[in-house]
Image (cartoon, rainbow, N blue to C red):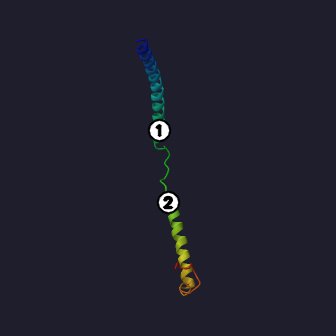
Amino acid sequence: MPREKLDRSTLEAALIGYRQQQELIEAKIAEIRERLDKAAKPPTSKARPKGILTTPARKKIVAAQKKRWAGFRRQGRADVGTSGTGPRKRQ
């Protein structure tokens, strides 16, 4: 009979300890959730999305591309088909 009381009192003490740990864990979970909620809010600044160019930047790129193609056309296309120029093909 004394063995049952010892086991029961040990289990009750363990239960009390685990409940205290559970409260600490739940408090930490709440803290983490609060931090995640703050991090999930979008920034207040009006930052542009990545990958979208402004109109002046796009015009500069178009002008540079036209300049490159004009130079290519001035050189002529006869050079393109000659052997030894350009990368080698895989065999």
Q: Amino acid at mark 2?
A: Thr
Q: Residue at x 49, y 62 (%)?
A: 55
Local secondary structure at mark 1: helix
Between 77 and 74, the one nearer to me in the picture: 77
68 vs 7, left or right, is: right
Between 73 and 86, the one nearer to me in the picture: 86
Above or below for 49 versus 72? above
Q: Rounded to the nearest whole Å, what is the CA distance between mark 2 and mark 1?
A: 33 Å
Task: Give the class, few, some or many, for how many residues have Cα within 10 Å of label 1's Cα (few <14, many ≥20).
Answer: few
The quarter holding residue 9 reads top left
Above or below for 8 versus 34? above
Mark number, residue 54: 2
Q: Residue at x 50, y 50 (%)?
A: 47
Q: Position of residue 46 (x, y in %)?
A: 49, 48
Q: Residue at x 46, y 44 (%)?
A: 42
Q: Residue at x 50, y 46 (%)?
A: 45
Q: Position of residue 14 (x, y in %)?
A: 46, 21
Mark number, residue 36: 1
